[in-house]
Image (tube, rainbow, N blue to C red):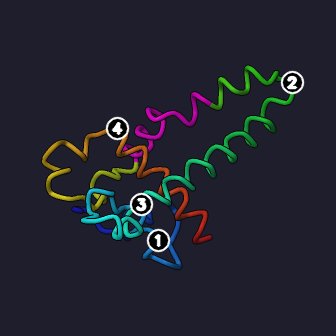
């Protein structure tokens, strides 16, 4: 991690009351040395963040496009929650500078991996949800 978490909080326009949630959201699964260590990575937060994001986006689409049919709303939803969209947000926030990962993951290009960036973005969404 090369970035200061205070800088990330400023970019998010949110200060965590439980900063350990933000650290957990930034902790890639490559850090786990065993199955027992998995609870010290962002995988569970990633799962929750995916669901929170999906619900929030669905609600926004429902409210913003009151005359749109279900199929069109589903296409909008898919476009907004897809990996590429989340990776773009991660790039905008410079999340790669903050992710904690094993040296082997970093050496294999982890900081540029769109799926990893998107997953971290979802984990941060969950951390925001859980903290606030």
**Label 4: which secondary element:** helix
Name the residue at the front extreme.
Answer: 35
Rendered residue at 72%/39% (across/down):
58
Pointer 2: what residue?
67
Q: Report the mark closest to the observer, 3 or 1.
A: 3
Rendered residue at 25%/58% (across/down):
101
Name the residue at the bottom extreme.
Answer: 17
On the image, the x and y values in percent for residue 92 come to 39, 44
Magenta-highlighted residues: 78-92
On the image, the x and y values in percent for residue 121 come to 45, 50
Quadrant in which the C terminus appears: bottom right
Q: Give me the disc on residue 40.
A: none
On the image, the x and y values in percent for residue 51 come to 62, 49
Q: Give me the disc on residue 114.
A: 4
Q: Between residues 17 and 26, which one lies in front from this camera angle?
A: 26
Q: Report the mark closest to the observer, 3 or 4.
A: 3
Q: Between residues 117 and 2, which one lies in front from this camera angle?
A: 117
Taking 6 as reference, is 55 left or right?
Answer: right
Q: Earlier in the sequence, mark 2 or mark 1?
A: 1
**Label 2: which secondary element:** loop
Q: Report the mark closest to the observer, 2 or 1.
A: 1
Q: Earlier in the sequence, mark 2 or mark 3?
A: 3
Q: Marks 2/1: CA distance? A: 39 Å
Q: Earlier in the sequence, mark 3 or mark 4?
A: 3
Q: Between residues 95 and 31, which one lies in front from this camera angle?
A: 31
Pointer 3: what residue?
42
Residue 80 magenta: yes
């Amino acid at each position: 991690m090369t970035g200061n978490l205070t800088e990330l909080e400023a970019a998010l326009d949110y200060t965590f009351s439980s900063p350990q949630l933000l650290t957990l959201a930034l902790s890639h699964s490559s850090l786990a040395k065993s199955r027992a260590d998995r609870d010290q990575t962002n995988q569970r937060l990633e799962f929750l963040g995916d669901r929170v994001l999906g619900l929030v986006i669905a609600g926004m689409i429902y409210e913003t496009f009151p005359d749109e049919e279900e199929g069109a709303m589903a296409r909008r939803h898919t476009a907004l929650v897809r990996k590429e969209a989340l990776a773009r947000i991660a790039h905008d926030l410079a999340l790669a500078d903050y992710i904690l990962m094993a040296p082997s993951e970093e050496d294999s290009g982890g900081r540029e991996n769109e799926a990893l960036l998107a997953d971290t973005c979802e984990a941060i969404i969950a951390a925001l949800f859980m903290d606030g």
